[in-house]
Image (cartoon, rainbow, N blue to C red):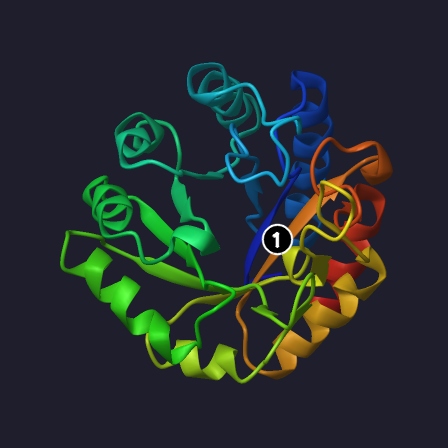
Amino acid sequence: MNNNNIFIAGPCVIESQELLDTVAEELVRLNRKYGIDIIFKASFDKANRTSLRSFRGPGLDKGLAMLDSIKQKYGLRILTDIHESNQAGPVGEVIDVIQIPAFLCRQTDLLVAAAQTEKIVNIKKAQFLSGRDMKYPVEKCMESGAKEVWLTERGNSFGYNNLVVDFRNIPDMMEIVPNVIMDCTHSVQRPSAGDGKTVGDRKFVPSMALAAKAFGANGYFFEVHPTPDEGKSDAANMMELSNLDDLIGKLL
């Protein structure tokens, strides 16, 4: 099966090598089944957790080594996010797609550093911006040497501790870049609503994906975990890894 959809999937944060291997093995199986090229994602450092006591990950050096091992062992393309401009160089030596977190999508130095790696830059739309506002972060990247920029919708703040998705942002952003991705798991968050952590409701993830498809999205971002309730970050929002097959089938 040939298609032009972008699929990104993996655990929220690197918890262990065993977890990375478990997810990667399933992504390889799905790639073969559907003739697609799912990009493996995981964060080496969750620098914006609600609480200082929350698990952040293994850090830059160890995390990149673990992600590189997945790339070499399974032949998967890799995506991870950066939070500081000095991370762009070392990340760019390993990673295929550098992601800019939504909270940081207007940080000029971060965007410029990511662009200068000449890797694909995926910018997540901030919870406080419209789709049309994203032309400016894209311009910062393109004028700094980026070869390709993607945009990702992840919802907008709706009062306190809640998000709502305005799906009109998808066609608006497709007027800026050719690839617009729906973050189907972070968009179901209820930020900081869980007594020191973010909560949410994963049952809405498939609906987010299918609605985004109806609005013209050509990419889908899923955080997945074999036992999401035991996950160390975004446990309430991650999909069960076993359910990814069925959802990708519906999207195709």
At a point 50% along the width and 21% down the height, the residue shown is: 63
**Residue 147 placed where, x, y %?**
23, 54
Q: Quadrant of residue 20?
A: top right
Answer yes or no: is residue 219 visible.
yes
* 158 up-or-down from 37: above or below: below
Q: Which residue is mark 1?
A: 35
At a point 22% along the width and 53% down the height, the residue shown is: 146
Q: Quadrant of residue 95?
A: top left
Q: Secondary structure at mark 1?
A: loop
* 250 up-or-down from 11: above or below: below
Q: How many marks?
A: 1
- Say whether residue 49 is left or right of residue 236: left
**Residue 107 placed where, x, y %?**
30, 52
Q: Residues within 10 Å of mark 1 (few under 14, many from 20)?
A: few
At a point 26% along the width and 69% down the height, the residue shown is: 136
| Quadrant where the image shows the C terminus | bottom right
* 37 up-or-down from 178: above or below: above
**Residue 12 placed where, x, y %?**
64, 39
At a point 51% along the width and 31% down the height, the residue shown is: 75
Answer yes or no: is residue 252 visible.
no
* 133 up-or-down from 87: above or below: below
| Quadrant where the image shows the N terminus | bottom right
- Say whether residue 122 is left or right of residue 1: left
Report the amino acid beneath label 1: Gly
**Residue 242 placed where, x, y %?**
84, 44
Front residue of 203/233: it is 233
